[in-house]
Image (tube, rainbow, N blue to C red):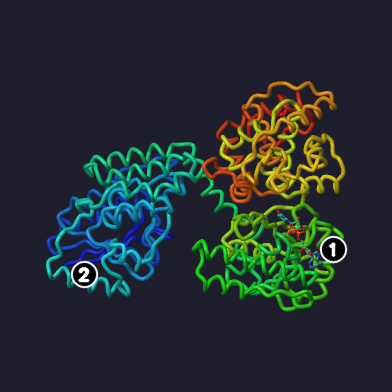
Amino acid sequence: MTNTLIEQEKRGALGIIRMNRPPVNALGYELRSQIAEAHAAFEADPEIAVTVLTATGRVFSGGADITEFNTGRKHPYLTELITMLEEGQKPVVAIVNGIAFGGGFELVLGCDYIYALPGAKFSFPEIKLGNIPGAGGTQKLPRLAGGPKALELILTGKAIPADEAVALGIAETVAADEAAALARLEKAVTDDLPRRRVRDIVMTGSPDELDAVAEGFLRRSRGAPAEKTALEAVRKAYDTPIDEALAWERDTFQILNATPEARAMRHLFFAEREARKIADLPKDTPQRTVSSVGVVGAGTMGRSIAMCFADAGLPVILVEEAQDRLDAALAAIAKTYEASREKGRISAEEASARMALIKGTITLDDLAAVDLAIEAVFESMAVKCSVFAALDKVCKPGAILATNTSTLDVNRIAAATARPEDVIGLHFFSPAHIMKLLEVVRAEKTAPDVIATAMEIGRRLGKHSVLVGVCDGFAGNRMFINFNREAQILIEEGALPWQVDAVMTRWGLAMGPLAVMDLAGLDIGYHIRQARGPQTPYPFTAADRLFEAGRLGQKSGKGWYLYEDGARRGTPDPEVEELIKAVSKEKGITRRAVSDDEILRRCMWQLVNTGYQIVEEGIAQRVSDLDVIFVNGYGFPRTRGGPMCFARETGLEQVARDIIRYHAEIGPHWKPSALLLEQAGIAKGNV
Ligand code: NAI
């Protein structure tokens, strides 16, 4: 016997169907069939005048069961179920009690009337999965809310609450609860509620109004298919007969669903949820309360970390060494909030409320009462250890002591305290109040409740927390350094900076690695390399020479590129080409033409091979976590799903074969990861 996923009730002339498939009433095959059967039964029942569709609990429907996207679907499809509702003799009224997302929203738009309860929320999140609504949403929402507003909602995936849904003409009314909605409906039925199919509403206005809404989205999506198609779809609402438009929308949804972009975005959707799970930490691991935060060091990172917490409503005490630096930091924070206010991102009240949450001090003792202290001082083991020794003395028992180090050994930092179990890495990415990644670095002695709390802190800040272990650069930077190193080797072999950058931007990065170095400043990398001493292979000679020649990047008007008259986009510089050629010559390298394909593979496979090594060593929990890291922390495009997803799309065996060849031809830094070989199905003997 199939499980009952709905509740049915007859109340006077109302036939009520309540979906009951926790957690989110995903519209899988069984739920769809049961709604269809119940609807048919009410249609046939002479005592029933109106069918009511609602749900038990706090969710209406989260939409399609997206596992079906990969496994195939069975009839009745959602489109067919909606058609049944529309073709019936009796009106159908949706009482939307909670979220109605995606297919859930489309089911609602297949009803004659929409009553919202206070917890209702409507949204089309399909764009985040590289798609558009596929069961009537693009044709029906414009008929209720107007084309421009509908297009905006489809392109943003933004959720709108009950009162806004009424204001936009989507919902009829907001009722206090289900009983109130039913009472109102009973009255309407007595007054002989007429049918009103959304599909039959005549569109007003002109499709030309859509271009202004779409423009910014199309630019930012850089040719991704879903955004372009959303515009095309809403246009059809104006000028195409609805049945034809619905058939087109259905087919288009299937086509988009099969694009690599949609596959990549679905992969990320699951990867981001998976990243929250920690294999060896029981679900019921307790958490520590964090309601106040201290940040030590108010430089680039300390400032933006403080803003992260203030943005989430937590009070922050920001500690600097000297009053002038503290004043400069607080002024810079105020300026950032002011700029957000000017751009309309936050209101004046929000700006001052957030600023008021950040208090500055030059006395570390002021952190005595905080629940969490985050250190963001210079990247020096000695400085960090002295700060942690001091925090150990100042902070209350049970406070979490975190470091924002990007490379240093968190075990050694923890050892500077008498409570290493309270110490953890919280590696934010610059600028911390914007970047969506938090690497949570677990050290040898970090307590389970500290790990659980740290993961949750990321979530509270609206970030994706990814758990990693201690090694040089943790997961993200260790991979990224090798990516950059390969770009440098390619330049010594014969590629030019602008060729490397063009390959990477064509692939989907917003900027190539050399342009990024120019933006960050060539002095930054230079000083890090000087502090670490030359490594073998050492391909950063050209970068060092540029720095030594006073070419610091954008800030000095010259770096890998030339930035004339303060331009932000650089142009190729023959002097740089000469300098690079001289470096190749000096190293005895005969320059050759390097193909774009080789550049792409070598840069990307460095990320991938290093990524598999990191998982193999237990530094990251799973391969997909690395995609979450690169998309949220390194600006990799969601439409590619991250470097590991790209490798899988290319074919792991192909990737592994390339790496084996590079290992033989280029050098030991290409030693293939055993885990990669295993997952690619290549036996050890074949290497
Ligand atoms: P920064 O040089 O801009 O800021 C460091 C600040 O710490 C300075 O303002 C300094 O006055 C202050 N400071 C030093 N010792 C102190 C002490 N004992 N008490 C109070 N304040 C003290 O450096 P940045 O870039 O903010 O980096 C800080 C940390 O964050 C480093 O560990 C770095 O590796 C890490 N990090 C940096 C990222 C970046 O993109 N800049 C990204 C992620 C992590």
Residue 389 sits in quarter: bottom right
Q: Is mark 2 within 8 Å of ligand 1?
A: no
Badge 2 amino acid = Leu
Q: Is residue 1 visible?
A: no
Q: Which mark is residue 185?
A: 2
Q: Is residue 474 visible?
A: yes
Q: Position of residue 227 (x, y in %)?
A: 42, 44
Q: Position of residue 351 (x, y in %)?
A: 56, 70
Tell me which residue sits at (24%, 63%) in the image.
52
Tell me which residue sits at (12%, 61%) in the image.
46
Q: Which mark is residue 385?
A: 1
Q: Which quadrant contains ligand 1?
A: bottom right
Which residue is farthest front?
Answer: 565
- Pointer 1 or 2: first along the chain: 2
Q: Position of residue 329 (x, y in %)?
A: 70, 67
Tell me which residue sits at (75%, 49%) in the image.
473
